[in-house]
Amino acid sequence: MELRRLRILPRRAGLSGRLLLLTIAFVMLTEVLLFAPSIARYRLVYLEQKLAAAHLAGLSLEATPDRMVTAQLTSTLLRHVGAYAAGLYGEGKLTHNLMVPEMPAVDREIDLRDDTAIELVRDAFDTLIQRRNRILRVIGESPKDASVLAVVVLDEQPLQEEMFGYSKRILGLSIVIALATASALYFSLQFLLVRPMRRLTQRMVGFHPEAPATDVPPKPRTDELGLAEMQLTAMQDELRYSFRQQARLAALGSGVSKLGHDLRNILSSVQVLSDRLADSTDPEVRRTTPRLVRAVDRAVSLTQATLDFATERPAVKPVRFPLADLIQEIAQDQVVIGEDGFRLDSTLQPSFAVDADRNQLYRVLGNLIRNARLAGARLSEIGAVLGPGGISITIKDDGPGIPNAVRPRLFQPFNTGRPGGTGLGLAIARDLVEAHGGQLRLVESGPEGTIFRIDLPFAGATTTVR
């Protein structure tokens, strides 16, 4: 039910639809911000045209000897100007004057010479919101001659009607521009962003790690969405691989748990036989029997530890013991097992002691040494240093190094670069170290050898290390 709801979400939310609406809204907001200076400019041009018309009407008086015209011609000139009066001033005095016989009272005087940009915008909106016709007396330099001061008295209502008509035209044009811009942006984003995002969402919602991979490989893209698609594909492949590994581990745990009881019984019988060998009078038998006993004990522990690895975190039973003794024991066992000239050296003082689970630390170090020997190393060195937060143990070998293809999943089960390897050694070693509260890391690896480091919490070393 939840997956079905998520699949419907993109259709309901309409990311592309929201982008379309937002684009229209922002374009309209931009047009509104541009409308204020635009309408102010329109009003200014309107009034300047009236002043220019008044100048031309006043010049008609120069065609008469006494600069006087008949009342009929005056009415005709003022009707063309669209004003009640028109006058021209030159050198500080009235030189030309036309007016109707009955002049209405002036409601407001506007001097275009002193208006600033802010005042022009304010006056434009003041004209738009007026509900009555005001009589305006407009003064300004004539657009025809800057040395002439023109004066015109006119109604405000025609100006208001012109401004409303201009506003409607601007609104219609803004809507067309907004729709055209939004449509172009909508289809661009639909192709470049929304469709790839929807494809990514559907892949994430429909992904199941246990199902076979049926996704079509993403088209090669160099942008962020192309990188996201490639990363998603890699993550899904990694999850499928991890689930397959977990399934194999579950099968391993089930099989080991069924065989564990019988294997412990067999090893118990071997322990009884090894105890009898300890009573032998043969010196060579008596010398090798302790190693056999230790090997059988560790086989029992290994069986239990394998069960722990397949089921839960291994239990830690720390004891205090000299680390050098453990290294010497590992060296003896590895040399006997190898018989190929392999050598294990240590820089530890005999009194260097740690608090840890001895058997588990033996397994960790033994696995690392065994891996180095099987990889072709002839020398492995173990050292340790005491730091403020604990002890760091380094294991260095002169082997050929770890293949690059193995390193990304170095500590994952069944990941091995050696033919015949199980890939469990490093995984078990890491879990055992983490059970101590520590960390196992690969420091470096190359043709000259490999270095691992084990960081354990403070374990109470008694001496310094050479």
Image (cartoon, grey):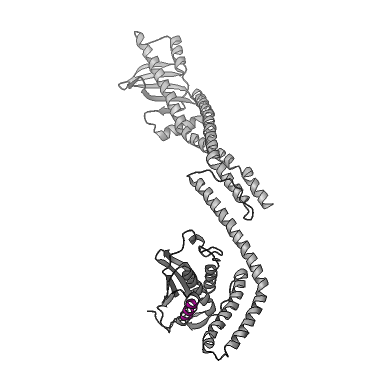
Against 141, residue 182 (above or below) is below
Could you tell me residue 266's position as x and y percent?
Answer: 65, 79
Q: Quadrant of residue 447?
A: bottom left
What span is colored magenta in the figure? 326-336
Q: Quadrant of residue 53?
A: top left
Q: List the single residue furthest toward the right.
A: 1
Could you tell me residue 132's position as x and y percent?
Answer: 53, 27
- Is residue 100 among what the camera can see? no
By secondary structure, the bulk of the magenta-drawn segment is best described as helix
Nearer to me, 311 or 324? 324
- Is residue 5 among what the camera can see? yes
Quadrant position of the C terminus in the picture: bottom left
Residue 253 part of the magenta segment: no
Left or right position of 61 against 283: left
Against 232, residue 348 (above or below) is below
Nearer to me, 36 or 143? 36
Q: Quadrant of residue 314?
A: bottom right
Q: List the single residue furthest toward the top.
A: 65
Could you tell me residue 423's position as x and y percent?
Answer: 54, 65
Nearer to me, 341 or 417? 341
Q: Residue at x 51, y 46 (%)?
A: 226
Could you tell me residue 90's position as x and y percent?
Answer: 32, 20
Tally the marks: 0
Against 173, residue 70 (above or below) is above
